[in-house]
Amino acid sequence: MDQTNYSVVVDEKVVVKWITPPVPLPHPTPEVFAHLVEAGFNDTAPPYAALTRAVDGNEQLLALVTGYLPEARDGWEWCVDEAEAGATEFAPVLGRLAADLHLALATLPVPALGATSTAAARAEAALAEALELTDGEDGAWLATRTPAIRRELAALQAPITGPRIMIHGDLHVGQILRWRDGYAVIDFDGNPTVTDADPCQPAARDVAQLTTSIEHVAQVAIRRRDADPVAAAAWAAKARAGLLAAYKARLAEKDRPDLLDERLVRPFEVEQECRELIYAARHLPRWRYAPMGVLRTWYQEENIT
């Protein structure tokens, strides 16, 4: 998937990510970087600096400078290789990585929840927009599955009582680099396609986006590597299960199993696929095959009656 911002590698020592367009301060990323360092979370590109400028008396964030990670490849490359090979050993590593990230972010203060739409209303709005923007045969198929999708989103109508934490906000395999010395999660700018999203949400929101991205990797392997669809679906199911099991085990090990309300994962996953369709329609039309492939896998005829 395409990047929203523009990154430049300088002398294989630092990466300068230019924010396009610049955004007003305060911005969460510099604070998150500083906190992760303080919390001892090192599985990210080392944060070095934030470049800002003053415009009419207001500060804007221009760029973020982080360390260069040798031999780094993002998940839309390395994870597709794993799917093609049928390998899932990476999945528990990603589960622990995501858990450690959430454990570190959970120690940040969380502001009181202001006036905002409920999770159910947000999900319903995403479905409505996906239906509006998805045309042709895909749109017609999606319309027939709307009752089944709404049944799964209905789980969000109950009050969410678990903890809110500062989440990554755009946690998918493309944000996880495999580099010479391991794995690193990057890009803490939030989801560029969701306006006014609360940066503090249930951890299940990140988990759902990460697990759905595994499903998208399977679709990429089918489209670009001629992977067998049945084998790719089985690979995705095994990888998701391994990731989620390792994530929960890590939280339990650190006495914070409460951070994940597993009941939220599935409806957040369904909402995420709606958002992927919106992203495809508004920014990257060629991407539509991935969320549609996932939805067609989930909502086969025999599964919706």
Image: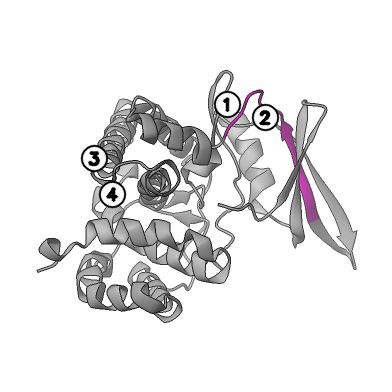
Q: How crowded is mark 4: few (under 14 residues within 10 Å), some or many (20 or more)?
A: some
Distance Cα–Cα, label 4 vs label 1: 26 Å
Upstream in sequence: badge 3 or badge 2: 2
Give coordinates of residue 115: x percent, y percent.
48, 73
Pick out the residue farthest to the bottom: 132
Question: Can you say whether 212 is above or below 256 in the image?
Answer: below
Amino acid type assigned to the residue bearing label 2 in the image: Pro
Amino acid type assigned to the residue bearing label 1 in the image: Asn
Pointers 4 and 1 in contact (CB under 8 A)? no
Q: How crowded is mark 1: few (under 14 residues within 10 Å), some or many (20 or more)?
A: some
In the depicted view, which residue is nearer to us: 210 or 158?
210
Distance Cα–Cα, label 1 vs label 2: 7 Å
Tag 1 residue: 42
Tag 4 residue: 261
Looking at the rendered image, the quarter that the C terminus falls into is: bottom left
Upstream in sequence: badge 4 or badge 3: 3
Q: Give the range drawn in magenta.
A: 61-73
Q: Which SS class for mark 4?
A: loop
Q: Which SS class for mark 2?
A: loop
Residue 234 numbered mark, or none: 3
Upstream in sequence: badge 4 or badge 2: 2
Q: Identify the image quadrant of residue 253.
A: top left
Amino acid type assigned to the residue bearing label 4 in the image: Asp
Give coordinates of residue 248: x percent, y percent.
29, 35
Q: Name the residue at 83% across, 27% down.
A: 11
Q: Which SS class for mark 3?
A: helix
Tag 2 residue: 46
Question: Can you say whether 156 is above or below 51 in the image?
Answer: below
Q: Name the residue at 59% across, 19% down.
A: 180
> In this orientation, does residue 268 appear?
no
Closer to viewer: mark 3 or mark 1: 3
Closer to viewer: mark 4 or mark 2: 2
